[in-house]
Image (cartoon, grey):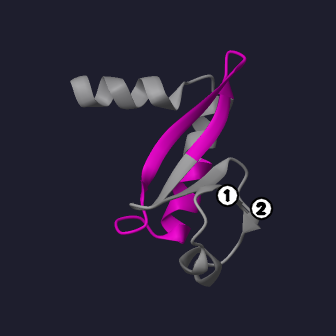
Amino acid sequence: MQVSTVLEIKNLSAEGYYSVAGCRGLQLRVTKYGKEFYYRYTWQGKRVLLKIGNMKSVSLSDAKKRTFELAELVAKGINPKEKKKLQRAG
């Protein structure tokens, strides 16, 4: 199922993953604990989920912007998950 507006997201109660319309790779995960944004991409033939943030700290528009930034990294041959690990360590 796809969601496209903040109102649709707020009204979701069924747990699971939802695609966000208009932003390739952006996923919304709904759990009993809250709602979180993820970027889903393929790296070296494997699917990867990278957490962007929860709805309390990241708006839908910010999640979309971040997804476009992460997609650019993948297009340049940079794994966003590895880059995030290096930034945390460094």
- Mark 1 lies on a secondary structure that is strand
The Cα atoms of the two marked residues, 1 and 2, are separated by: 6 Å
Position of residue 83 measured from the top left corner of the image (x, y, whole percent): 42, 27
Amino acid residing under circle 1: Tyr
* Earlier-in-chain disc, 1 versus 2: 2
| Residue drawn at (44%, 61%) of the image | 32
Q: Position of residue 33 (x, y in %)?
A: 38, 60
User: Is 45 inside the magenta-drawn segment?
Assistant: yes
Instruction: Residue at the far top: name it.
Output: 44
Q: Classify the position of the C terminus by image quarter.
A: top left
Residue 18, numbered label: 1
Task: Indicate left or right for 43 with 58 as reference.
Answer: right
Residue 48 at x, y percent in the picture = 59, 30
Q: Residue furthest bottom?
A: 7
Location of mark 2 (residue):
1
Where are the magenta residues, as a range? Answer: 39-68
Whether label 1 touches label 2, CB < 8 Å: yes
